[in-house]
């Protein structure tokens, strides 16, 4: 019996997790959300440039569809925050997959707030090169991006007309699902061009990002679905991330219960094995 | 394909067909681009999830579609935004300046030389391009990495002593006392307080205490960095004081691995939630 419990079919674990997530979605229980300091730092950094003449924020969409549940809500809310504050916002992508997601985020918020492309925002699209693109942007923005994704000259658009180099952006936020944040943005942009960089990353990457927070190379960090929910809370615009926190907690409870159950069974089995060995040695 | 594989395939296919037919019947989904898009996405999601039951043809279909579409999407983006936008159109433009043409022509030739590797007899040409790539890459990245990944990280590890709080001093004093006890214990061939789960438990208690009092983090970072570096210093035997410190380094590594594993679970569950929100919301309209 104990051996059977120690070797539960993994599909049963999957089933319990799926049921817990579905149940928490169908019958949601509101949970308190307390924004963490790292998320608040990103929010405040963008609010701090409100009212500054020609203030601009650059968003880099360095993720694909597989990370959209964690990062897309952050992208939408940061764009919303910039547009509500009348801060110019420019998007770009170091991943080709980020183009569709970036366009979708800009289109939805711009339509909602009635903002005009070219004047209030633009999306530049994707370019390969990674580090060389950043170095190019640091020296001459217009050479790196002569036109935006839609073919309009960056020199002719109000939102980018006075941007001559990367350092002209008041804040840069990279939404990253890979090594672009530390391998490219922190390494080549922060120290060399003295930009203020914030990060929004998948939860998997979060532990690797904390050293950059401590060193000040990252101004703030929005981490995973929990960070996205905290950002939605700060923006007072509840969306998919806040709705996802109940299912997330339910799934975590199930996983913790399975871990506890597995450990208890392990110790019980070990005690029995020791007792059996002892009784064989004594001839009992 | 064994029998249970066929049953699984049929079950998941039936689940998708029946639920989709129900959504179309109640007019939640129409035969327009939006409706068909949702149906396709829901079907592929279910096909991929069917692998959790067991490997089956539906999963293979979903997997191959994903790889093909991702490659196709990437190719289209690169073709329109890079080849067409950055190379062909500027080079064929009647207003192209000579300097601009050279700036684009030289990297293009270097790129074509890389592809020459595929042609027998011309493979040597790719070495020139590789030499450029390696030389440029090393020249650009080595100083940048040393500055941002090493020097910038050393400073915040060592600088906190200038503005430590009282809890940092307390924790560092405790760490020093434990170090001396540990060194004596290891020298006397005893493992009191250092073996098994006692040590990690003490570290977990210290980390929890530090979190709730909101202090002592600078000392913990300093102790953690030094201890982990000592653990990876294999030129000296891990005995006595070195052994005690390296053991503490192992505890820090275990805590880091645990945190990393926890974050990984959180990320994977987030992706599941994203798909479930789509299936229950957009497809079945239950949310």
Image (tube, rainbow, N blue to C red):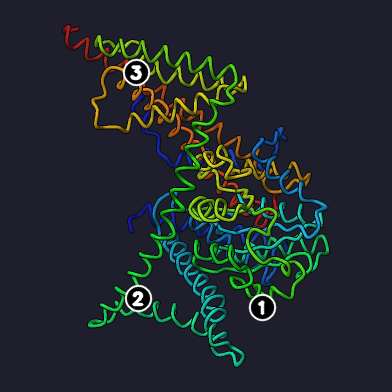
Q: Chain of mark 1?
A: A
Query: Could you say whether the residue bearing mark 2 is in a helix, strand or loop?
Result: helix
- Tag of residue A39: none
**Mark 1 nearby-residue class (10 Å; few <14, some 14–19, many ≥20):** few
Mark 2–mark 3 Cα distance, whole angstroms, equals: 55 Å
Query: Could you say whether the residue bearing mark 1 is in a helix, strand or loop?
Result: loop
Mark 1–mark 3 Cα distance, whole angstroms, equals: 64 Å
Along the line of sight, the residue nearer the viewer: B184 or A209: B184
Q: Are marks 1 and 3 on the same chain?
A: no
Confirm whether residue B33 shows in the render: yes
Q: Check the image and report above or below for B151 versus B200.
A: below
Q: Where is residue B233 shown, x and y percent of the image?
A: 30, 32
Confirm whether residue B265 shows in the render: no
Residue picked out by circle 3: B196
Q: Earlier in the sequence, mark 2 or mark 3?
A: 2
Quadrant where the image shows the N terminus of chain B = bottom left
Residues tagged 1 and 3 counted as in contact (Cβ below 8 A):
no
Query: Could you say whether the residue bearing mark 3 is in a helix, strand or loop?
Result: loop
Along the line of sight, the residue nearer the viewer: B181 or B260: B181
Q: Where is residue B164 shown, x and y percent of the image?
A: 57, 23
Tag nearer the camera, 2 or 3? 2
Q: Quadrant of residue B35?
A: bottom right
Residue picked out by circle 1: A151
Tag nearer the camera, 1 or 3? 1
Residue picked out by circle 2: B114
């Amino acid at each position: 019996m104990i051996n059977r419990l120690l070797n539960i079919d993994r599909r049963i674990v999957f089933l319990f997790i799926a049921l817990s997530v579905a149940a928490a979605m169908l019958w949601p229980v509101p949970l308190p959300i307390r924004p963490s300091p790292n998320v608040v730092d990103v929010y405040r950094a963008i609010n701090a440039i409100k009212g500054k003449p020609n203030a601009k924020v650059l968003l880099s969409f360095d993720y694909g569809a597989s990370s959209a549940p964690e990062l897309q809500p952050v992208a939408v809310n940061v764009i919303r925050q910039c547009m509500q504050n009348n801060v110019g916002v420019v998007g770009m992508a170091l991943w080709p997959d980020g183009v569709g997601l970036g366009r979708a985020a800009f289109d939805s918020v711009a339509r909602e707030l009635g903002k005009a492309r070219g004047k209030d925002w633009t999306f530049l699209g994707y370019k390969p090169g990674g580090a060389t693109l950043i170095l190019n942007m640091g020296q001459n923005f217009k050479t790196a991006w002569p036109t935006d994704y839609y073919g309009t000259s960056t020199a002719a658009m109000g939102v980018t007309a006075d941007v001559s180099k990367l350092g002209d952006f008041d804040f840069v936020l990279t939404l990253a699902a890979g090594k672009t944040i530390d391998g490219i943005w922190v390494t080549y942009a922060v120290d060399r061009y003295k930009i203020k960089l914030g990060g929004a990353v998948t939860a998997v990457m979060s532990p690797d990002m904390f050293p950059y927070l401590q060193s000040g190379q990252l101004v703030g960090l929005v981490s995973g679905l929990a960070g996205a929910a905290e950002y939605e809370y700060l923006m007072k615009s509840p969306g998919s991330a806040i709705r996802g926190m109940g299912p997330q907690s339910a799934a975590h409870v199930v996983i913790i219960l399975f871990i506890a159950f597995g450990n208890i069974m392990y110790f019980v089995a070990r005690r029995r094995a020791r007792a059996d060995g002892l009784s064989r040695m004594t001839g009992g | 394909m064994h029998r249970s594989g066929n049953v699984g395939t049929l079950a998941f296919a039936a689940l998708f067909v029946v639920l989709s037919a129900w959504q179309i019947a109640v007019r939640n989904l129409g035969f327009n681009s939006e409706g068909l898009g949702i149906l396709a996405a829901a079907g592929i999601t279910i096909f991929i999830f069917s692998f959790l039951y067991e490997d089956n043809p539906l999963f293979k279909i979903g997997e191959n579609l994903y790889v093909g579409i991702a490659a196709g999407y990437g190719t289209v983006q690169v073709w329109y935004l890079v080849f067409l936008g950055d190379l062909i159109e500027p080079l064929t433009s009647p207003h192209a300046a000579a300097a601009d043409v050279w700036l684009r022509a030289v990297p293009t030739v270097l790129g074509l030389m890389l592809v020459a590797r595929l042609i027998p007899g011309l493979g040597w040409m790719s070495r020139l391009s590789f030499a450029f790539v390696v030389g440029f890459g090393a020249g650009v990245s080595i100083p940048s990495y040393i500055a941002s990944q090493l020097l910038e990280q050393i400073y915040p590890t060592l600088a906190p002593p200038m503005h430590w709080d009282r809890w940092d001093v307390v924790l560092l004093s405790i760490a020093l006392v434990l170090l001396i006890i540990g060194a004596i214990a290891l020298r006397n061939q005893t493992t009191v307080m250092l073996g098994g789960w006692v040590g990690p438990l003490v570290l977990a208690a210290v980390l929890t205490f530090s979190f709730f009092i909101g202090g002592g983090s600078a000392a913990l970072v300093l102790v953690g960095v030094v201890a982990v570096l000592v653990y990876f210093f294999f030129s000296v035997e891990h005995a006595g004081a070195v052994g005690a410190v390296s053991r503490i380094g192992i505890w820090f590594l275990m805590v880091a691995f645990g945190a990393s594993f926890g974050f990984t679970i959180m990320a994977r569950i987030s992706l599941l939630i994203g798909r479930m929100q789509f299936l229950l919301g957009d497809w079945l309209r239950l949310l």
